[in-house]
Amino acid sequence: MNPAVEHRSGSSPGTTSIGALSAPGEISAQLRAIVHELNNPLAVVMGFTQLMILSDGCDGRFRADLDKIYGEMKRVVKGVERLHAYALSLQACVAPVSEGGSANDNPQSLQPPG
């Protein structure tokens, strides 16, 4: 197992080892939480970059550098969107089980969407 994702006694709250994530719904929930944590700072950095680009005096090499940063941030957005879509596809694999039933009662619930 990757030591970077192992849960340790001194790790921050809310972290879980990959081994503990046994169901697609649990994995989906963790991925959606990661997407949320990436989206907030990403929006801030992109917003401030846009403000700097639009400000007076932003020209030359400084503007070119900011344009490059903004372009790379757009790449990150696409990656985060793909991660979110994957999390949602995992969630779609999890069908609610009626009381007294089991996941085996609905074999289609185990099939990935698409």
Image: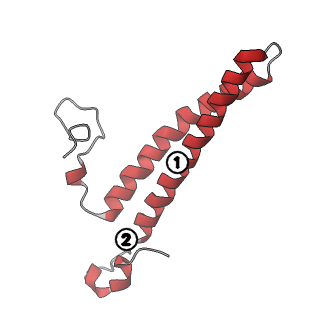
Visual colour scheme: secondary structure
Question: Picture quarter containing residue 41?
Answer: top right
Mark 2 residue element:
loop
Residue at 50%, 76% in the rendered image: 114
From the top left corner, tell me how far across and down residue 90 is, in percent: 40, 65
Q: Amino acid at mark 2?
A: Val
User: Residue 60 shows which numbered tag?
Assistant: none
Q: Amino acid at mark 1?
A: Gly
Do we see residue 37 in this rendering? Answer: yes
Give the farthest residue toward the right: 56
User: Residue 94 shows which numbered tag?
Assistant: 2
Mark 1 residue element:
helix
From the top left corner, tell me how far across and down residue 97 is, in percent: 33, 77
Instruction: Quickly name the residue at label 1.
Output: 79
Give the farthest residue toward the left: 9
Residue at 79%, 24% in the rendered image: 54
From the top left corner, tell me how far across and down residue 113 is, in percent: 46, 74
- Could you classify mark 1 by the number of other residues whose Cα lies within 10 Å: few (under 14), some (14-19), or many (20 or more)? few
